[in-house]
Image (spheres, grey):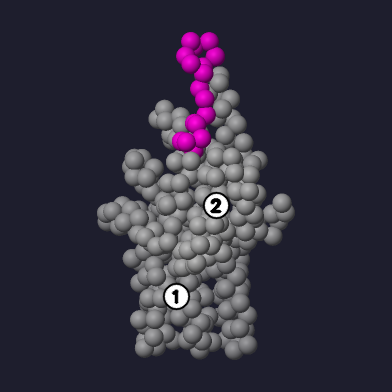
Amino acid sequence: MNNSAGSTLEERLLHPRRSLGDRYRTQAERFLSSGNEGDAIWGEQMASKAVLYDFTNPRNWKTLVKSRIKLGDEHGVSSALKDLFSVLGRDPNLTDMLKDVDMLIHGASILAESLRIDPLDPDEWWALENPINNLLEKIRSLDFSDPRANLLFSRRLERVLDNGFEEEYLEHATILLAQRPMNHEAWTKLGKIHERRGSTDEAWHCYDQAQVSYPSCEERDRFIERMGARMDGSGSLPWKKPPIESRAEFLEGMRLLAGVESNSVFDQDVEAVIADPIRALMASGRLNEAFFLARRRAAEGDLEAEHLMNEITEAMQ
């Protein structure tokens, strides 16, 4: 599978490149301060690239909105706010409630206030008063299929773990991973926590997900080697990987978590869903659910599901 194009986009979205973001923002500010009307167009283009490469820096967003205000682009300001709301895990359609607001006058202040009460920087966010309950409630209720929002809340959740809230981290990291199952680094972190706690089956499930998402990491294989080394000469029964039933239960649980509309079935013909539920999920754009369902059926020996899993993985990347 050729991942070059997909990996490039994935890096831009999921691993912000601060140096490039800073470079483009600096160029944008230079164009915007020149006083030349034509330079404002270049300034907006540079600011857009700054946000593309690093959506976690509030200065990039402020420069983008500033550039669009300078161009008199009220729709562009609204579009930037809608995009930011999506990153913050809010309903981007909230901007529709502001349709009567003059964005050329108030857009910059709306942006600044949004960033003040909901900082992009995870350390600034942690410094807010009692941020945990609000975070956990959002993770349980919001749609994090936007990979940027998923990354932002994953970083916030890491601050929760860093401050000793391990149980909360374990429960809520799984919810985020259900909507971003290809994040092998997060699966590996979960696996290490479970392994340290002695929950070997749970650890294997996480390492297995990590290696399926990114085969080169080999986390599952290394875990099996560690478990074998621990048992050698100890007199204990050899460790065995979880049975198919356990894997199927884990993957079905992840599929249910991946459902954005958890109480609905499919908006499709019922017979088609019954005949081929994996393809029905794929056709409706619910790739994360399709991924976990295909993995579950593949674990149970369904060869067609295994082929579909590869197809889904390519589509997700």
Q: Which residues are magenta?
A: 231-247
Q: Position of residue 105 (x, y in %)?
A: 40, 86
Q: Which residue is mark 1?
A: 81
Residue 68, compared with residue 160, is above or below; it is: below
Residue 14, compared with residue 301, is above or below; it is: below
Where disc 1 sits, the SS reads helix
Q: Residues within 10 Å of mark 1 (few under 14, many from 20)?
A: many
Residue drawn where x is 45% and y is 80% of the image: 78
Tag count = 2
Residue drawn where x is 27% and y is 56% of the image: 129
In reply to whether residue 216 is colored magenta, the answer given is: no
Residue 253, compared with residue 207, is above or below; it is: below
Q: Position of residue 136 (x, y in %)?
A: 33, 53
Q: Position of residue 1 (x, y in %)?
A: 71, 51
How far is disc 2 from disc 1 in space, using C-alphas? Answer: 32 Å
Residue drawn where x is 65% and y is 58% of the image: 6
Give residue 291's mark. 2
Which of disc 1 and disc 2 is earlier in sequence? 1
In the image shown, does 22 or 311 lie closer to the viewer?
311
Q: Please identify, in this view, whether the residue under mark 2 or under mark 1 is nearer the observer.
A: 2
The image quarter containing residue 297 is top right
